[in-house]
Amino acid sequence: MPTNLVLLAVSAVLYGAIFPINRWAADAGWPPVAFAAAQLLLGGVALAAIERLRGNRLLRSVADVRSYAVIGALSMAVPTALLTATAGHVAASMLTLVLALSPGLTLLFSAALKLDRLRPRVAVAMLCGFAGVLLIASPWSHALSAAETPWFLVALLVPVSFASANVSAALLRPPEVGLGTMAAGLPLAGGVVLIPLALLIDPSLLPGTMGGAAVATLLAGTVVNAVVIIMFFEVIRRAGPTFGSLFHYVALPAGVVWSIAAFGVLPPAIFWVAVVVMLGAVAAAVGGPRQAG
């Protein structure tokens, strides 16, 4: 199997583990935004230290600070905070579905900013994506309880943030900054951005009892996020962003499998229909990439 495909598949499968980890963190008593900030900061510091040992400077100019802050907030801080905040209220398998909207929204935003042409496949991707959301969120589907539905709708801001990050990266990323340095700077900046919000929501920043479960979920989230971002940026370096967009093909079903394995609860039949429809959205959005490697 080509190396690039292996890297992409492994990174996407690992990312799927974030969904049950977030649920376990909520059960362990972590304040959601504090948990998001802590894992991003720990991972960012570790990656920044590695980059420094390699002789690479994290900050070279004001443009670097701006790009890390904006892209880090949109790609790391906001999605991580939203996923951790909603993890205690919506089944982990349901939350994975929001990943399917990101590719289509990215193409839509790119077209709106004239970074890309508005193609028919963008319309198909968006229709499939929203059809999948409708299947899950509609009251008649009974896939979500009345208490879960508002939180699922909040989670839909995750793909909006991811898509905004993708567009921002095209506009703001300094060309002289290597992908390894960006991989270190984004989670670090994302964690810094979240600290004020975490303090505002819960000044304690830590669970009531910092027991084994709380520490384990923090370490697991930190390692998964750090490893995934390194591998994902390596895939982009080797094969380009188009090939990297295949990430969503694997991350969505991987998250579902991780969630079912972790909690032993099978989603209702309508969920699987939504998965097929939303994978159609991903296929329409990233259809036709050339495999490299």
Image (tube, grey):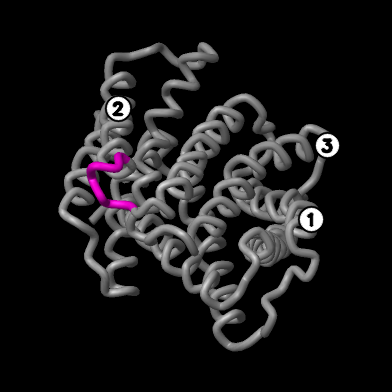
Kindly tell me whether residue 254 is visible in this rendering: yes
The amino acid type, in three-letter code, at marker 3 is: Ser
Which mark is in front, 2 or 3? 2
Give the residue pinned by disc 2.
125
Residue 64 image point, x, y percent: 76, 38
Query: Does the stretch in magenta take in 189?
Result: no
The image quadrant that residue 289 belongs to is: top left
Q: State the residue at coordinates (24%, 60%).
A: 267
Mark 2 belongs to which amino acid? Ala
Check residue 200 in the rendering and tell me which mark sits there, or answer none.
1
Q: Nearer the viewer, residue 123 or 273?
A: 273
Query: Relative to residue 110, is residue 222 drawn left or right?
Result: right
Q: CA distance from mark 2 to mark 1?
A: 38 Å
Assess whether mark 1 and mark 3 are in contact (beta carbons under 8 angstroms).
Answer: no
- Give the number of marks: 3
Decide if residue 54 is in sight here: no
In whole angstroms, how far apart are the C-alphas of marks 3 and 1? 30 Å
Which residues fall within the magenta stretch?
A: 138-144
